[in-house]
Image (cartoon, grey):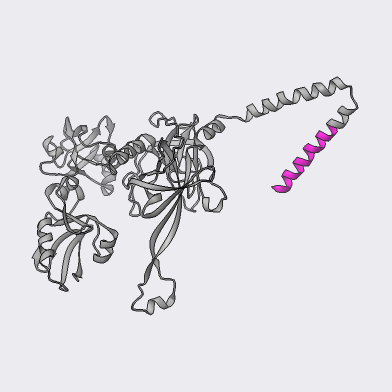
Amino acid sequence: MVRASSRILIATLGLAGLSVACSSQSEGPLVDQASAQRPAQTQAISNSRRTAIVDAAARASGSVVSISVLSRRRVPASDPFDFFSFFVPQTTERLVQGYGTGFVIRSGGIIITNQHVVDGADSITVSLGDGADLPARLLGADPTTDIAVLKVDRDLPAAAIGKSADLMIGEWVVALGNPYTYLLGDAQPTVTAGVVSATGRNVVPNANQSGIYLDMIQTDASINPGNSGGPLTNSSGEVIGVNSFIFTSTGGSVGIGFAIPIERALRVADEIVKSGNVRRAWTGLTVGDANTMRDWKRAGGVQVVDVAEGGPAARAGIEPGAVLVEANGRRLRNYLDWEAVKLDLHVGDAVSLKFKRGPTGSTESRRIVTDDLPSVAAAKVSVIKGLELITVTAGVQAERGLRTDRGALVFRITDEVSRATGLRAGDVILQVNQTPVRTASQMASLLESMGSNRLFRIFFERAGSPSYVDLSFR
């Protein structure tokens, strides 16, 4: 490639030299006329190169930032003698550096990115296009939608915001980000272009992802590691999505990338800026999951498998066995369509449902008014510093899909307490030694009654399976 470019350059210079030589033997006015023509030709060439993609990249690039994250990760011990030492664990914590992209959404240094970019971060640094490095503060993150919000103490230019709702299949889009930024010497964003391949894509979840990717924008604009959190813009340079992930069998881009619609990203970001978290709306009903996806055509919709007693759906007259066919005007083909409707609901929003009481029943209409999640509304009991429990109720059981209808659910637990106890958020404590646990306050009383250095066993449910851990207070 370098040799070919050199030959072209030499040929160009040779022609230029020939032109000058010929001109020097001509009349003076001819030289002046040729010189006068060059600026016009240069301007014409420049105008022909300035496409919509060039303008879109120029408009959006000033708001794009590179994100560097330092986090502590548990990794296998590297020293082979560690495995023979009683005092050295077989895993150890090390600082790991990760990279991603973000973009400014409002004045005051408010930046949006993906939650998975900053997950577990001990420190976050934002690098600007001019080379400046700024410490960033995490305002909040929502694993469900894979959106996080950062703040830096500098006023930065905000991106122009567009709409994803009216995207056309095949229209040009531009992805900006910082792929493989650790290999490059500056933080200037990389620009790739492609088209909108599809809209409204629902991605079937897997065990390795915490986010729910629904109504996604699919594009063939190249997205690579480090692009996550960067903007996807239309040909006018307006942001219409947040680049999130790719499908790949090689680890690199193969032209199947996905972006979160900007409307959802901004709604989540606004809630995080206001309160530091996102309130999820609760409908009080559960539908069949991925295992029943093949049945939707036969059923003609999405079947309700459980209705929480006293919840929003029960109050609206929805019963188990009902087949949901439409929600807020959206046709429900499978459970992912229903999850997509729920994902964009605020607490207190109404859902207009059309359903049948069984596959052959007539279509009825109902209106569900959503509530807060039962686990969020429940009273919290702090048993020790860094550990909050709530009592399992019928609503909490339905919300979390628990097998047990009693016990104390671990609502919030710090990493330190989790490592010390082996418990995780979402575990349900069922029993301490021989004593069944029915409420969170009872669990707190049991722990208070434990004597110093006394060993005790906690039985709990995790992901539907029973387990236990032996602990002691010192």
Residue 293, horizontal then vertical, whole percent: 28, 45
Q: Is residue 27 left or right of residue 454?
A: right
In magenta segment, residue 57: no
Toward the viewer: 48 or 132?
132
Give the quarter of the figure containing the C terminus. Answer: bottom left
Residue 180 visible to an observer of this rendering: no
For the point 12% across and 68% down, the residue is 450
For the point 89% across and 22% down, the residue is 27
Residue 463, horizontal then vertical, whole percent: 23, 57
Q: Is residue 205 left or right of residue 463?
A: right
Which SS type dominates the magenta stretch? helix
Quarter-of-image position of residue 28: top right
Residue 68 visible to an observer of this rendering: yes
Magenta span: 1-18
Whether 33 is drawn above or below 302: the answer is above
Quarter-of-image position of residue 30: top right
Q: Is residue 14 left or right of residue 89?
A: right
Q: Residue furthest front?
A: 153
Residue 12, horizontal then vertical, whole percent: 77, 37
For the point 53% across and 40% down, the residue is 192
Toward the viewer: 280 or 329?
280
